[in-house]
Image (cartoon, rainbow, N blue to C red):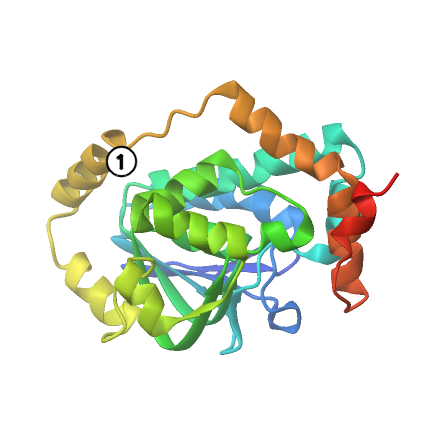
Amino acid sequence: MTETFAEGGLILTPGRIATLTLDRPQRRNAMTRAMWAAVPDICDRISDDPTIRVLILTGAGDKAFCAGADILEFATVYATPEAAAEYNTLVRLAQQRLRDLRCPVIAAIRGACYGGGCGLALACDFRVAEGAAQFAITPARLGLAYSPADTWQLIEKVGVSRAKDLLLTGRAIEVDEALEIGLIDRVDQTAQTLAGHLAGLAPNALRAIKAVCNGLSLPVAPAPLHQAFEETFASAEFREGYTAFLEKRAPDFEKELKP
């Protein structure tokens, strides 16, 4: 039976191959605070359902998999350092729980996959581009850092040098380059095709393989890295960055350096 969460922003369709759909096409499936907060409960439901062999994570429509966190909430969720830390913890927990699901998880990506949307895709076991897709990790454009957990997931897939390229430039890349550098895994088959293959394999063996792989690649980030990341949300650069985005203009980070 299909269930909805976070005021309809998330839809879980159970089955042997279950689907979790980000359903805010009018906002390019951007993640709200309520959506991030709902992900752990959804993961619990999936884990408790022995009939689910594979999960597909996808976005509604063809324009976006996920445009990241909803910038319209930024003035609220980042209003104070305490609020920012709480919100960032929700994001990290959602991605961690998705990554730690016992069953294989496939991101079916169409359209824009930006920022926190890339973080969601990186938390999945496989990333499959279904048709046209574009990828960008853009916190630097907003005067922010990328979290240590997200940065580690990116480095895990593409290596340090390419991770720096994507993070420092904030540039968008197309499917061919994403496949070449390892940001995505497949473009020549649908997520359903891959899911059907995985669903026919021994589920306990897949769980064990996934647990071993994840356990051997655990990130260890020193506390100062988390502090440096959190501090960017209290900066004048960030306020200028997201204000400029909302006003559809280029940010003027230079003015923040003027006396």
Q: Position of residue 180 (x, y in %)?
A: 27, 65
Count of residue discs? 1
Residue placed most toward the observer, 17 or 248: 248
Q: Residue 48, can we see it? A: no
Query: Label 1, on which residue?
Result: 214
Compared to residue 205, the image places residue 55 above or below, namely below
Q: Position of residue 171 (x, y in %)?
A: 51, 63
Instruction: Check the picture and name the quadrant holding the N terminus.
Output: bottom left
Compared to residue 154, the image places residue 59 above or below, namely below
Identity of the amino acid at label 1?
A: Asn
**Label 1 secondary element:** helix
Compared to residue 63, the image places residue 127 above or below, namely above
The residue positioned farthest toward the top in the image shown: 223
Q: Residue at x 50, y 41 (%)?
A: 94
Q: Residue 254, can we see it? A: yes
Instruction: Check the picture and name the quadrant holding the C terminus.
Output: top right
- Based on the displayed image, in which of its 4 quarters is residue 20 positioned? bottom left
The residue positioned farthest toward the front in the image shown: 259
